Amino acid sequence: MAEKTMIEAVREAMFEEMKRDDRVIVMGEDVGSGGVFRATEGFTQEFGEDRCMDTPLAEACIVGAAIGASLNGIVPIAEIQFADFSHPAFDQIVSEAARLHYRSNGTWSCPIVVRTPYGAGIHGGPYHSQSIEAFYAHVPGLKVVCVATPYDAKGLLKSAIRDPNPVIFLEHKRAYRLFREEVPDDDYTIPIGEAVVKREGTDMTLVTYGLMTHHSLKAAETVQADDGLSVEVIDLRTISPWDRECVLESVKKTGKALIVYEDNITGGFGAEIAATIAQDGFEYLDGPVTRVASPDVPLTPYSGILEEYILPNPEKIATAIRKLAAY
Amino acid sequence: MAVLKAALKAHGLGDKQLLEIYYKMLLARTLSVRQRLLQRMGKGAITYSGEGHEAAQVGTAYALRAGHDWVYTYYRDVGVALTIGLSPRDVLMGFFARAEDISSGGRNMPSHFSSAELRIVSQGAPVCTQAPQAAGTALASKLRGLDEVTAVYFGDGATSTGDCHEAMNFAGIHKLPVIFVCEFNGYAISVNWRKQAAVDNVAARAEGYGFPGVTIDGNDVLAVYGSMKEAVERARKGDGPTFIEAKTYRLVPHSSDDDDKRYRSRDEVDLWGKKDPMTRFETWLKENDIVNTARLDELQARAAQEVDEATDSAEAAAQPDPESALRHVFVEGSARDG
Amino acid sequence: MAFTLTMPEVGETVTEGTIERWLKKPGERIEKYEPIVEINTDKVDVELPSPVSGTVTEILAAEGETVLVGAPLASIETAEGEVPADISAPAPSAEVTAAVSSPIAKPSAARRGGGEARATPRVRKLAEEMGVDLATITGTGPGGRIVEDDVRAATGGPKTAAAAQPVAARPASTLGADEESVPLTAIRRTIAQRMSAAAFSAPAAWLAMEADVTGLVALRKSVKDAFRKRHGVDLTYLPFAAHAVSRALVEHPYLNASWGDDHIVLRKRIGLGIAVAAERGLVVPVVHDADRLSIAELAMAMNDIGERARVNKLKLEDVQGGTFTLDNTGAFGSIISQPIINHGQAAILGFEAITKRAVVVAGDAIAVRSIVVIGISFDHRILDGHQAGAFLGDVKKRLEVFSAETGID
């Protein structure tokens, strides 16, 4: 076991799966020379151009061809260079990949992974910073995973590749090289749909995912030290299907729920979590279900000053924790 | 005559095959008409007829290896579906949206054909999403070193979509074993080809993507068959894609919800009616002593009976269980609840 | 066999069609799938194929007529067994699987914090506002949950009306410089709701009479000291009023009733509510079976509930079971008033201040008498004026009977 960054973990997951199963290929723009984030570094040398395939600049075709290939004995990983550029593929993802199994009454299935870097905080501007999980979590027939730690990334990406259903695999780009942690060198998987309690607590349940997990853990430490507040931090890891039981059990224990997500607040996935807690956890609540998220502004402006103003950070999260705790 | 028959035989078309082709066209025609009438009786919400397209559909599909080659159809392709091997009952089970409908269990609109066994891939309604998928399936055949080809069917309107261009581009780059078959009838619902593109023949675009495109008389079933056979052989050999533009005409409105009097004249429809591929092939078969009138009548009666029996059987079949609406969102056993 | 051809749904969203032209006449033969009639719809013009073979016997919709989907168009006589299969809609499933998820587990009665009683956030807030300790309350809601009414009952406040609408406080930003916004207490809110409910549902009429209570005044004066010594409580005029009212109610059952929308509910027992002005607001605790209590018993009961109301110690049973309300408006000097009916009851009687007046007595002489105005607001759905008047006259008579000679026992 060694300490790895998240991009290394992603690379390892794909590499191991491609060695393990001849059917797995990765296709996308620039993957042949290692990819713009180096996720496929060394793959062409190892697997050849046919299995690490540079595609034309045509996202609809990347995903469409992946779908077609997945029906004929191939397990494609379609890399979309930035989540912001996934929208041309929306039709293939939503009209086709998500629906194929259902509309054919179970006859056909589409075992593709569409993986893409997402998220803000790198001065990426409005087209290298978007969050897209809400669009796809809304669609029956898709699984959506959001990772921001190396250990989670490798285990979940392996599960996604092995899943017979279409999986949208979102990797927070800011977390790619943010820190290192122990990642097993060998084969292991993390089940899709399972959240993890990253920090135990008794006063409040904080539900989050992606980069916000890191910010939330920092905020939880701060409020423990400064205010004596004990916050339980849950990283959903999978957005769809999400781990309702884990969250509701926690809220039952603590009585207060704070949901933190980077995406625009309105219609962001945290709204679904909030609605579920309000309806199914009503009996346990000792305060209003509260959300911390970005305001409804295109994510994100390029200027560091503007970007910082918009995005949630440990300070804003800590403030929200204190306010809810005082209720 | 002998020379012609010998030539046809060289292409694999003896009398038996010619009559098979004719019968598939006849079944397609009969089924299209039957579904139109059933819909007007209120027995189905919608139907898309293939009347007029029989030669383009049956001629191309007949050149494929059914169940081995891959087929991506669109909603007008009843002739393709029947030629590859779906039965009239299979088609009508979809019309009536019955539980055992092979294409979708009544979940997809009628005429969205699907069969895993026959390798007819399930289709959605967004136009031409099937083209990149077909390219992907052909890519898989190539990567796996198999001798399968993939045929993808669509109308002329579909050629304007980004998906169509992206798929053709991708297929050309990798010399994929895929045949693009455009059933060109000159109308995308009501929009005439003049408003769809700036060129007369859409096949010209193939050159821009690095492979051959051919424009043929889509109402001449033998010419269609010949072109497709050539394209299939090219693809199987590894020489890459072909674009076949089969010029034909839709003798009826786009769907049961369309009133084609709004956008085209009866004179035009009558003109093309005289070029009906059914009568044209019947005439040819008779002139070349492959059938006589009595035999044709017999075949027509057989097709009518087959469709009648299929109608009764499909109509009497069980409806889907309402609760089954919740199944098959995910491949079962792989999704967590909640 | 006779078959009726009906108008089918020929296109998505098509709901009707106009008969353009019949292609067959009665007596003519028609084959299955053969076109039988041309119909215009706003979407498409259609030729309807016949679903059966047979002979047309009757045209049921004429050319030019507009028919709805499902309407009969023609009768066709078919050969036996030729009726087409019935494509009815699938039988509706007994239960549609709802997308609403249910709570994963019913929480047990014990809450976080150990021993804290179960109540929703709203109820806990109310309890906090009203100074009620949830631990002392037994919940009457589902699973033993404490509901709003339980909290109110613990304070003696009136029960909530259906679907309490929160009264929005006037936003501070619209206040004038010389205005102050006072937020509503829960009890104020409840009173507002109930008064509104009563006032806006029951058409209330009102009539008043004067009673000569000179004798009553004398009676009370003569016994009050001894009463005080013996029972430890003051004897006011109110027990006498309660006595008169409760006995009169026995004779006038429609005054002890409730409006049931399509019927009147007569109540057999008398629960006399006594309006009490607690500092927090109006409360109306009940003296149960007041008609069976003596003056002394009434006095003690009313004193008890009055006291407990004032210190917010009423129990649930103290505020339940009221059937008629007695309002001692005279206590703050009113000589005539128009009380609002207690929601759910038929009438309310206001007992005004007793004043000395110069009145005309028998023989057209002027005398000084103690006079009290008694007024009754009544629900005119249940009662007419003469019924209310008869009851009030009864009360008046009983009040006028009291004298130093009758005593209070």
Image (cartoon, rainbow, N blue to C red):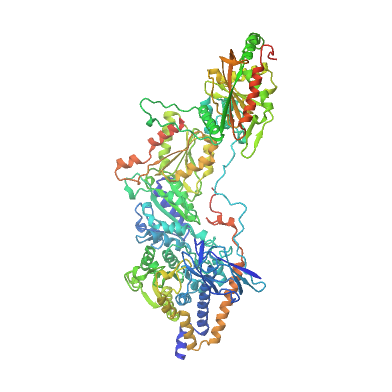
User: Quick check: can you spot residue B158?
Assistant: yes
Residue at horizontal 66 percent and vertical 19 percent from the top: C298
Side of B194 where A204 appears, left or right: right
Residue B242 picture location, percent across and down: 39, 73
Side of C352 where B128 appears, left or right: left
Q: Residue furthest bottom?
A: B2
Numbered marks: total:
0
Q: Is residue A294 above or below residue B131?
A: above
Residue at horizontal 43 percent and vertical 62 percent from the top: B126
Residue C79 picture location, percent across and down: 65, 74
Q: Is residue A270 above or below residue A63?
A: above
Residue B20 picture location, percent across and down: 52, 80
Nearer-the-camera pick, B20 or B38: B38
Q: Quadrant of residue B241?
A: bottom left
Nearer-the-camera pick, C242 or A32: C242
Nearer-the-camera pick, C112 or B68: C112
Residue B113 picture location, percent across and down: 51, 67
Q: Is residue C198 above or below residue B236?
A: above
Q: Quadrant of residue B181?
A: bottom left
Residue at horizontal 56 percent and vertical 34 percent from the top: C203
Side of C223 where B111 appears, left or right: left
User: Quick check: can you spot residue C245?
Assistant: no
Q: Residue furthest front?
A: C363
Q: Is residue A305 above or below residue B76?
A: above
